[in-house]
Amino acid sequence: MISKKAKYALKAMIHLAEQYGRGPVMTHQLAGQGGIPKRFLESILFDLRNHGLLQSRKGKDGGYQLRIEPDKITLAQILRIIDGPIAPTPCVSKNFYVRCDDCADEETCHIRPIMERVRDANLAIYETTTLASIRTSYQDRREAERVL
């Protein structure tokens, strides 16, 4: 399960992808649009900026905008910045491996192979889903609803 912080980060990043190329979006606008507490959002945006996904500008016309094109930012990138490892257990993490304390032998562990499959299924989605593809999927659904 992703954290509430990660969910807020995804909401903010999707909104910024929708505004891509139109200039910065102010924090209070992002907070209002996503129903996100402003102070909490500020710390999320700070993390995303420090990891190179966002750029910010101060002042009257300031705010945040994507530093990278929406089709180059995946859900996996955002989730790793905010929540860290995507794996359901530490022993199956590709980037943040930690041996489980209660596991005597990983080779005979009955749970590990299942958790590897869960990790791989999640990663298959997270690593191939970009902010642009989410935006396109949403627009396609809206268009289909109008046709019906």
Image (cartoon, rainbow, N blue to C red):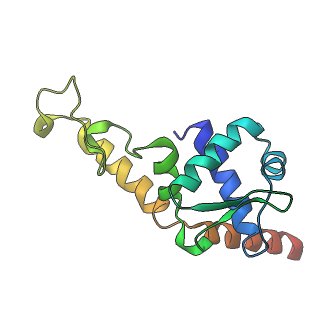
On the image, which quarter does residue 133 sit in? bottom right
Task: Name the residue nearer the viewer: 116 or 28.
Answer: 28
* Quarter of the image with the C terminus in it: bottom right
**Is 67 displayed left or right of 11 in the figure?**
left
On the image, which quarter does residue 141 sit in? bottom right
On the image, which quarter does residue 104 sit in? top left
**Is 35 displayed left or right of 146 in the figure?**
left
Residue appearing at x 15%, y 36% in the figure:
106
- Give above or below for 91 relative to 52: above
Q: Position of residue 71 (x, y in %)?
A: 58, 74
Which residue sits furthest top? 102
Residue appearing at x 86%, y 58% in the figure:
60
- Give above or below for 40 relative to 19: above
Q: Position of residue 77 (x, y in %)?
A: 48, 58
Residue appearing at x 54%, y 66% in the figure:
73
Task: Name the residue nearer the viewer: 84 or 136.
Answer: 84
Task: Name the residue nearer the viewer: 10 or 26.
Answer: 26
Residue appearing at x 45%, y 63% in the figure:
127
Which residue sits furthest front? 59
Residue 138 visible from this viewpoint: no
**Is 41 displayed left or right of 128 in the figure?**
right
- Give above or below for 126 relative to 41: below
Q: Position of residue 100 (x, y in %)?
A: 23, 30
Residue 27 visible from this viewpoint: yes
